[in-house]
Structure formats: structure tokens, C-alpha cells
Amino acid sequence: MDHSILGEQGSMKKLLLVGNPNVGKSVLFSSLTGRYVTVSNYPGTTVEVSRGNARLLGRLWQVIDTPGVNNLLPHSEDERVTRDLLMEEGGHKVIQVADAKNLRRALLITLELAEMGLNQILVLNMEDEARDLGIQIDVHKLSEVLGIPVVTTVATRKKGLDRVIQSLEKMRVGSCTTSFAPEIEQAVADLEPLLPEAPISRRSLALMLLCGDETLSAWLNARVTERDVARIEQICRALQTKYEEPVAYVVNRQRLLKADQIVDQVMRKGIQEFPRRFQRIGDFSMHPIWGLPILLTVLFLIYLVVGRFGAGFLVDLIENEFFGQVLVPWTQKAAQLIPIAFLRDLLVGQYGLVTMALTYALAIVLPIVGTFFFAFGVLEDSGYMPRLAVLVNKAFKLVGLSGKAVLPLLLGLGCDTMATLTARILDTKRERILVTLLLALGVPCSAQLGVILGMLGGLSMGAVLIWAGVVMATMLLVGFLAARVLPGEEGAFVLEIPPMRVPQLRNVLVKTTARVEWYLKEAVPLFILATLILFILDRIGVLETLQSTFQPLVSSWLGLPQRTTEAFLIGFLRRDYGAAGLYSLSRQGELDPIQVLVSLVTITLFVPCVANLMMIFKERGWRTAVSIVLVVFPVAFGVGGLLNHVLRWTGWTP
Amino acid sequence: MRHRHRRGHGSSQGRSMEDEQRLEEYLETLWYLQEEGRQELSHIKDAVGEAEASHLLLALMENRWVRVDGDRFCFEPEGAQKASQIVRRHRLAERLLHDVLDMGPDQVEEDACRFEHILSADATESICTFLGHPQTCPHGRPIPPGPCCQRFVKEVTPLVRPLADLNPGQQGTITFITPKFRSRLHQLSSLGVIPGTSVRLRQRHPTFVIQVGESTIAMDADLARNIFVRSQG
Ligand SMILES: [Zn+2]
Ligand SMILES: [Zn+2]
């Protein structure tokens, strides 16, 4: 992932930006690094880590923006990634970024970094806001107490940046650490001799283990004999029996008390109320009554960006203007030069790689997905998402979920596969399974949604409402029933609400690019593969056989023409691709309005695409994957057929 | 949950006792109807039957416990007082059987019907205090407060109560967090929420939102009920 510019990688020192979420780390990161920034997922996770190079004090550094953390004793995936980055290799340095308004929580991390024995400085960012609130921090005193350089900045206005760079020379290991209760200290002393050499201190490792950190076990097993592992486990268990509460909680409390002592020494808090412009909007967006109109406005704006601009303007531009006028005719002309008809068809035939795969992938899907990820990034960066979670929490309880699940479900509108991976942020296994099921069942990805709305828009508003109503009712019913069947209890949810703020365009663009890149890598090969399979099935006549095999189901029960089998088939390879297939069928006039509605409801509820299924398999195991397919398949065809018969019976035309 | 009473239990006792019990049951029936906002005379007929309804009304009006305004009934002060005490005894008994003897909400009904006629004022008060002055029965219906509950509100509430009982805007200092949600303790402490920390409740609906220093944290009602605070008004 590291694209070296100068080949100085080997000698390049690493500079890690560490801090609580929403303290302005990424703004500082942007001002320190140049234009060449890479954003990549930390191996095996959904967590994005940005890296860039910077020439500071006459030497080249690799600067790494780590995910925001509240504690280096990992609880979430973000926290784990940051802890692991700190444990990778030795000799790197840490810039801890803190919100000057929230010194107490920053100090919890400072104390942990000192315990790890890492060189660091502390940056008190948003110093202006703290001053407006009447908070006064004695920086010299704080630096003395902690034993590390402390500087103040206003990163958004690049104020204090030079102070940060100057203090890099004076980086030191913090001298202020926490002492714990005698039993804990004794257990630490017992553990230390058993632990291997590591880039962070044995004391900090010992404390993590005592706090029941299971994420370390793989690392430990690779370095310590089996007998020592057993002894380590025994010491940890013995300590836990002495406390009614989890040791992690006891340790956190003692650290926070130490942080409180420091705060008392260095900070004077005023009582001014700070007029925060966006705080009001933030409060309204969580309000039981005002929250709703705000939500509707947000949805409408998303529709404008994704539906009108992405699916309308951009698709038109790329599909008609570029693909229709330029690329396809040109390729067709070029293909005339190919003497073999088979190859010609493969490229520009009915199931051709250019005419079908590339057109669908780049001309239809990419603009829609791209604009969706952009809109999603804006929402994320503004701090609206957690507020939405607060708003929908109670409604989600009905289907056994907490408000937190709104994030993966919304992201599912971009790409169900990516969203399935993101289900990890949920706290209980039960919730993760429920979200995975609902994503697989009824959440159409934005490309599919774009195509569906395009087709339904041609019918009537009533058709759109019936489609949305049937899909949502099915999801609610299945979720409601699944929540009753699935074992495990509902987790009580806790969620930090970040301050509302104006989204940073650069932040949003960097994230959008990373996601689109991920999507293209994931989707385009599958588009090509799907087209190839169709092409071959068509050539060897299997397509026809399949169509006649499924004829009873498709024709009699769903009341659809035979060729829709094709759409369902490729729908399994990619759902949006399947919807695009239906789109072209209806454009050729092969579907009547009821057939359009029935086929769209069926394909929306249809089994997840291959990529999503593989992700479910990887994340949740094969049992869950198989069970989900066994639920989704009958539900999709059952509901579709039912709708068909009800519509025909009532004689209603959409 | 409606509480309907079969007539005639305790019939082995003397006639006047039985009469008194029947009057109490009548009062109780009307109290439940009033709670549901069904105060028309036709509602009484629906509840107890045509013949019984006129019996009931006549008896209660004779005692000046209830009067009729047009087609609706209402309680006279004395009747309301008496009825609320009967319901209070009934529902406290339910709580006792449910909380202490671990009986399900469906099982407590019948026994509670017996208790409501025999508990003395003193016994009722000690049960109420013992149970911590509960506000609802196991079925979620309100328990009319007694004198002991009012004293409790004045003297004890300012000390320690669940975070969930604060009003929006009120502040408190966390005194303890019950370990019911063990897995949440680590996360809460990472966010700075530990005993000794001062919190302000920002909103209760649709989800609890609290302010701790400069941090805003949303949490489920279930969790807010397990965090206890000393309120600061
Ligand atoms: Zn009851
Ligand atoms: Zn009481």
C-alpha cells in the first residue's frame, strides 16, 4: 500500500497521529502531508487508514492517520487497529491530537501511551473553541506534569502548525503513569517476566492481558510457549476473581481518576455558554418531532444527488453520449476487422463484454454508486449518522435491532457486500446476523435502486408505492419473526454523538475515492464474469434449458415471460445487473405493467449476489449463509407470486 | 390488564362482610373503567352485565360514593379515596407476589384479589416501603400513591435515583452503575462515564442522550435505568 516516492522507505521514520474521534486529526494530517495520500483498509478489517509522506525538519516521514479511539485497550475494531499500528515495528513516534475542550478523555490515552513507552507529543487542538468556552489550560504546567511537549493548535486555520513541527525534536516518553491497586500491580509484576520482547512496554502488555484483551492471543501464542500461555491465563483469571466488576473497568476508573487529578492541576473551567451554530441543528435532528422533517429533507437531498444527478444526468451523459455515440460504435467498427464471428460476438454481441459488461458496470452502475458514496461520505463527515441512529432506535427495536444498525443498512444502499462487512460495528452477534439477513433480503444497492426507480417511474406513483410497501413490509415481517427465533439477548446500546459540523470536502472526496476503488475492484470482474457465463450458457444452449426448467415457476406462478429467467440468473451474479436486464426487457416492450412490478419486487427480494454471499460466508460462516439463502429464496418467489395473483385478481393496473 | 372479579369468593364469612367486599369490588370495577376512560353507563353494562350494573350503581350511589351526570358516572371524593386505596392494595399485593415470590403476572391476579380486602393500612404501608414505593403493578398499571410514597418523594428522592428518572436539563453526579450490563462498563468508562462524574440529561425521547463534560452520549433506556445519580436539581 505504501507507494514510495523517493525509495527512502527503509530509512523513513513513522509518525502516527493518535487521538479520540472528531478531534481534528485528519485536518492536521492533511496539513502535514502533501498531496499523495493513500487510503486503504487495514488488513482484514473495514477500518480505513490514511498514509502520506511529509518532509519535516529536513527529513522524510511517513505520516499515518490512525482511526479515532477512546481507549488503547481495544473494545471496537477501530481501537484494535490503532493499538496494532502502535505495536507494529519499533521506533516510531506518536503525535497525540486532543480536543482542548475535552482534556480529561484525551489524558486517558496520554497515560496509556506513556505506559507503552512511546515517544510522543500532545497537541491540544481547537484551542480557540476551548477559549470561547472559558476553558483555560496551563500548557507549561501540563507539559511538566506529563513530561512531554504540549502545544496548542487550531488545525482548521493552520494555527500552531509550526509549533507542532518544532516540537517533534523534543519528543519524549511521558513520565506520568498510573499506579494501580496492589493486587493489580502484583499481577503485573507476575506477568512481566513471562512476556516476549515487543515494541511497547511489557507493563502495558501485561495490563492489556489482565483486562481480558482477547485480541492479543494470536500474537502471544506465536511468541510464548504453551506452558507460559497457560500461566498467563491463570494469573489473569485469578485477578478477575478478586473483583466483582471487569478488571478493564477497574483499570479504566483508576486511569480516569488520575486524569481528573491532572485536569484539576492545570485547567480552569469557565461558565460561558459557547454559541455553537450547528449544535442547534444537531439537537433538532435527534428530536422526536423535528427529527422527522429533517430526516425527510436529508433523504430528499440524497435523492437529488444520487437519483437526479447520478442516475439521471451522469448516466445519460456516460451511457448515451459516451458509450452510445462513441465507444460502442467504435468498438463495433473495430470488431469488423476481427475475422472470427465468435470473438466479435464476445465483444459486441448481445452478451458482449463491451455492449453488456462494460456498459452496465461503468455507464450505469458507476455514476450511481459514486454519487451515493459521496452523499454517504457527506452525511458521515457532518456527524448526522449517529443522530439518525438515535432517532430510529425505538423503531428498530421492533425488528430486534438497535439504532446503530442504521449505518450498515444505509450503506447497503451503496453496496450490500460492503455493508455486510460493516455489520461488525454492531455489538451483538444476534444483531449482526439480523442485519446481514435484512441486507440480503430487501436492501437494494443504489445501482439496482436507480434502475428500479427508473422503471417504476415510467408506470405510476402507485407502482412505486406498492413496490416500496411490499418490500418494506416483507423486511419488517421477516425481521420481526427472525428476531423472535434468533437466540441471544438484545444489547443495550451506547453511542457517542460527535459534534455537528460542516463536512470537509477533502475528507469526503478521499473516502469516496477509496470506496469507489473498492467497489470497482469488487464489481467489474464479476460483471465480466457474469457476462462470460451468460455468453457461454447461451452458446451451448443451457440458457434455453434453464429457461424451460424454471418455466413453471416463472411463467405460471410469477406470470412472467421466459426471458426474465435470464435476468434472475444474472441477478444472482449481481443484483443490480439483474435489474438492468429487466430494464432492457421492459424497454423492448416484453413486460406489461404488472409484470414489471412483480419482477422488480421479486428481484429486490431475491438472493444476495455472489460477492455478498461470499462475504456472508466469510463473516458469518456457512451455516448462516445457507440459512439466509433458504429464507430469502422462498420469500422472494412467494411474495412475488402472491403479488402477481393479487394484482391479476383485483384487476388493478399500475 | 383488566381485573375482573368472580363474585362470591370469601362467601363463608358473615353477610355484612360479604356485602362490604362486594361494594369494594364495585368501586374497583368503576376505578378500572375510569382509568380506561370508559365512563359511560353503557360501559358498566358491558363490563358486568345488565342486571348487575343497576345493582352496582344503586349500591354505590346509596353510599354517596358515586354520582351520575347525564349518561356518565363519576366518583364522589369519598368514593374516589376508597376506590384508590383498594386498587392500591390490589396492585401492591401483585407487586409483592411478583417481585418477592417470583410469580408470573398471570398468576398473581387471583391472590391479589383476596389481599385487597384484608390488608390493614399499616400493613399496606410497610409492604409499600419494603418494595421501595413502586409506581406500577406487574401489568404496568399505576399504583395510587399512599402517604408513605409522598414522604419518600420529599425525603429520599433528592439523594439517589436512576439516571432515567431525571428530567431533561437536570444534572446529577453518578454514584454507581449496576453491573447488569458488564460488557458496557468498559465502553462507558472509555467515554469518561464513571462514578463521581457529573452528567446532564439532554433528552429522553426517542433515546436517552446525556452530556458528560464536552461529550454527548446516547444510550438505551435500559442502561439509563441502571446508572444511579445523586441529583443536583
Ligand atoms: Zn395489575
Ligand atoms: Zn409508599
Image (cartoon, coloured by chain):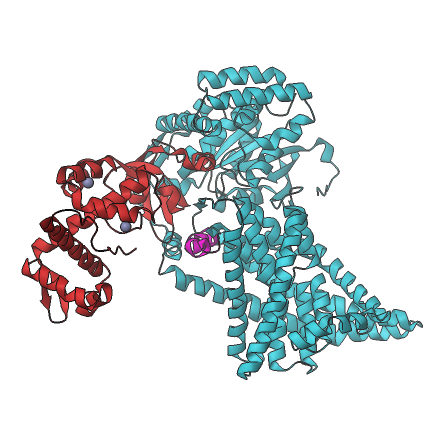
Chain colours: A cyan, B red
In the depicted structure, whether residue A160 falls above or below residue A558: above
- Residue in the image at 21% along x and 39% along y: B128
Q: Is residue A467 visible?
A: yes
Q: Residue furthest right?
A: A339
Front-most of B150 and B115? Answer: B115
Main secondary structure along the magenta-highlighted residues: helix
Assign the C terminus of chain B to one quadrant of the image.
top left
Asked if residue A18 is among those painted magenta in the image, a careful observer would answer no
In the depicted structure, whether residue A638 falls above or below residue B145: below
Residue A596 on image: x %, y %: 62, 77
- Residue in the image at 35% along x and 53% along y: B205
Front-most of B215 and A153? Answer: B215
Residue A372 on image: x %, y %: 58, 61
Q: Is residue A524 left or right of residue A34?
A: right
In the depicted structure, whether residue A173 falls above or below residue A471: above
- Residue in the image at 13% along x and 40% along y: B121
Q: Residue furthest front?
A: B12
Residue A80 on image: x %, y %: 58, 36
Front-most of A528 and A48? Answer: A528
Q: Which residues are magenta?
A: A383-399
Q: Is residue A149 visible?
A: no
In the depicted structure, whether residue A308 falls above or below residue A138: below
Residue B179 on image: x %, y %: 41, 33
Assign the N terminus of chain B to one quadrant of the image.
bottom left
Q: Is residue A56 left or right of residue A249?
A: right
Counting the numbered discs, the total is 0
Q: Is residue A135 left or right of residue A163?
A: left
